[in-house]
Image (tube, rainbow, N blue to C red):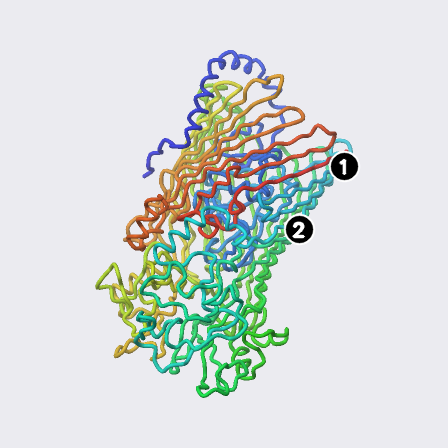
Amino acid sequence: MVRPFFRPQGPRLARVAAAAALALASQSHAQQAAASAAQPSPDESRKLERVEVTGTLIKRTDKETPSVVQSITREEIRNAGYANVEELLRANSAVDLGSIGDGAASGFVGGVSTISLRGFGSQGTLILINGRRTAPVAAVDVNFGRGTMINVNTIPKEAIERIDILKDGASAMYGSDAMAGVVNYILRKDYQGIEGSASYGANDRGVGATKTGSLSWGFGDLATQRFNVFGGLEVSRRDSVMANELKDRGNLALQNQYLTSTGSLARFTPDSSASFYGNYYRLPASLNGSTTLGGISVANSSLSGVNYLGTLPGCPADRTVGQGVPNRPPGLLPTSASLPTGLCRFSLDDADEAVARQDRHSGMVRGTFAINSELSAYADLMISKTRTIEQRVPYAMTTSLVTSGNRAGTTWPKLDGSFLRQNAIILPVGHPDNPTNGTASQQAVQLIYRFEDLPTGDINVLRATRLTAGLEGTAFGWDFDTAILFSQNNNERFQEGRVRSSLLNAAIASGSYRFGKPNSREAINSVSSTAYNEGKSRLLSWDVRGSRELFQLPGGPAAIAVGTELRKEKLEAVPDEVYGTGDYIGLVANGAAGSRKSYAAFTELSLPVVKRLELQAAARYEHYDDFGNSTTGKTGFKWTALPSLMVFRGTAATGFRAPAISQIGNSFALSFHSFQERRVFDSLRCDTSNPDAPVSKAPVPVNRDCNVLGFTGVPAGTVSPGSLPTVISANPALQPEKSNSFTFGMIFTPSRYADLAIDGWYFHRKNEIRSQRGVDIMDGYNANPAGNTQVVRDPNPESWLPGVPDSGLIIMLVRQYGNNEWTKTSGVDYDLNVRLPALPWGRFSMNVNGTYTARYDQLVVKGQAVQRQAGTTSSDISKTRASATFKWDTDRARAWIRFNHADPLASTLCTSLTAAQRTFLGNLSRCRVGRDRTIDLGGSYSGIKGLTLSASVMNVTNDYDRANGIPTVLSYYDSGASNLLGRRFNVAASYVFR
């Protein structure tokens, strides 16, 4: 049952603007009469050019269809002030934060930008270029894409004529994936001249600079010369941004006050005991018990405990305890051990990269030839290369002590699902870097070490090629278009300086790598190498589609469209051979290989049954050779209730998404998994008799026992163990996801100076394809552990609880793709435009548009409680998201100011904090992600012939409230996006040669 739509509770500005529009309605009667007089006659209407409109397969003279389509024109793209097109799209109210920003790493491939509509993910949003598909990124990403990711940063900005966002289900027109809508990039087709442009942007301190240059050109007149060739090139470079370059954003001082007053260390201070100048420890037979040091009982497993022996020489003073680092830094609990004098520390925050460096090169060329007045041939080629260089934090294998009987420092899964373990770095007697050599107490020592001299680059190179060749025209009363499409994406990933088990063991034995000392390139290569992944995805298709008028109805000619499409897809994602051996310590990779063929037949009817009522119906049948068939349909209407004043429209549609090749075919997926809504306990190894203070039953407490899935909001004095390794297996029995969607709305035009569109929407996706959640596996295990094979424990008896066989800590979960339950979401979109009468000093206009999401509900597993996620970090969807833009323009100059708003998101941040921590954050109203309330402004000048100069300032007030908790660069919610930079500016210049 469809839940009733709710009135949007947007910013007050939207209500004021609506009142302004209605105030103009008094002029409507006279203007409607004038408009009626200006309407073309029936003969003139038939001569109007029919054009393609996203959301229908039938060419038409009326661009308003039953579907909700938002068009962003070329001029709007240029004058919006955003650095690139992806940034503009992410600002759209229907686009959620499930979209990937290419400044953030997905964990499996970097440098990718995706678009997600209505919270359905990139896999539920179809991306088209000129109405046709493009190949997905060749990566098995179990996080953001859930199997399918379409990269949208490959299209030169100057090649785009407009972008259409279809905001309802469209599988009946376009096929799989179009459940939440379609983003259709319409490229320029007919251009003559040469145009060049350049832009530069950065934040107000010059951080995060992006430099872009482009050139577009065209020649040939289709009308007189029968041909046109258009091309464009674009190059850009974005600088890397380290987190410490943004310490001035937000309120770091308040964050540190909170941390130090509630038992944690301040940010951007030396907080890790693993450094290049390693700290060394004795190798005891047991770590049980504690020792009193300085009047404090210190666990023998502590890095500040009795087993600390010393530090390798060379540690800088600002990182040495007792010099630049106090023995008891602010935030240390009274019961925590003092840091030993001489201990060397490392600042993780200072090594954290916030935005990756990126270089883009893209180009396209399109040729059109008019064979005759009825037939044209066309071809277009797009090529792009995106190189993203991320910097990892230097690698430390472990920060935990081991015993002489159990020397394992870390474990990780192989591609075959078995487990490997690597001993901690233990320097034997005689090793050149063992400081105890030649002393009375010479002994083997464990080194807590960070490989700061190894390269940390994580380089992703994405290459895309797309070629289309076709014919379009008119024949036998049909408007037709047919084309062959070839699209290919190549991905390469180079992870430099990955430590390998076999090499490290050999280097320790031979002394080829010197710990804490300068190393040659050969020495570095003796412990590490570059891990390499390669992927290719290909799409080859042929389609033909045609439309024509059928017969005359009272409201006009009925029309039909029919078409067919043949498509072949292939995916290969292959890690290098070292992955197969599991030799990269702690590194997992995913792979897939498969192909599929599909064909489709589709049709659409447009029926203007009476003068003011148009009905639409569409259907599509598809057959896939790997899972079967799918049939989808769509109906719609447009009723002009009051000519030139009020139009009602609506649609009802079914949709589907085919399982991705990586989900249904021959694939393997290893990932690190976490759950951030609550702590998950291991019922075997965690004592929960006091639910507020659960403790590990192990003699040496293990953080994983009472926090299996790495919940980060842990109380002071405990540490999250991080994500848990998991193996995800494909499922050849998967069935497609299915959906139902409904829209209903109106367009109100009280005068030629104002129009208002309000559209309610409802989407229901069912049979959702998901990998099993670790929390569901653990909940099932804790309820009934007998016979469970999905929870994998450490088989080493040294890790077992005393007297309890097979009770090792949990080291892995086995998950599988499956068809789960449903997601339901509904809400209202609104779009108000006001255009004041032209004045001698210019034209003024205003636009208010936004989305109110009334519900976003999910049921993942049947029988569980429904999750109400609208306005929470679980969905990343604010209940209200809107913007208001005010513009002034003349023939030579224009200026604008934009107010952006998004409601806060409820967060689980405070769920597992101590009472003192909850009180501190609660008093600040920071147990949430803050609202977005930024202001942008800009303008341009084109008074010099051919030259246009423009400038914009984004986030004028440097608002940084969109953070989870107290605002800082480390808590900013939309990581990898340009908003992370705070206040920023952009200047640009373009010149047209005629």
The answer to which of 549 and 642 lies nearer the viewer is 642
Q: Which residue is mark 1?
A: 220
| Label tally | 2
How would you rate the neighbour count of disc 2 (Cα within 10 Å): few for under 14, some for 14-19, many for 20 or more?
many
Camera-nearest label, 2 or 1: 2
Element on which disc 2 rests: strand
The residue drawn where x is 43% and y is 32% is: 759
In the rendered image, residue 695, in percent from the top left (x then y), is placed at 28, 66
- Image position of 705 with respect to 205: above or below: below
Q: What's under tag 1, amino acid-wise?
A: Gly
In the shown orientation, is residue 376 left or right of residue 794?
right
Question: With respect to residue 891, does 310 lie above or below?
Answer: below
Q: Which residue is mark 2?
A: 361
User: From where the camera sits, is residue 52 visible?
Assistant: no
Q: Quadrant of the N terminus?
A: top left
Residue 986 sits above or below residue 136 on the image: above
Give coordinates of residue 120: x percent, y percent: 44, 47
Label 1 neighbourhood size at 10 Å, few (<14), some (14-19), many (20+)?
A: some
Please provide percent x and percent y for residue 847. Answer: 51, 28
Q: Is residue 933 above or below residue 261?
A: above
Mark sitting earlier along the chain (2/1):
1
Question: Is 95 positioned to the left or the right of 694 in the image?
Answer: right
682 left or right of 257? left
Locate residue 681: give its quadrant: bottom left
Front residue (pair 322, 350):
322
Task: Find out whether the residues at labels 2 and 1 contact each other: C-beta distance under 8 Å.
Answer: no
Q: Visible in this render: residue 881? A: yes
What kind of residue is marked 2? His
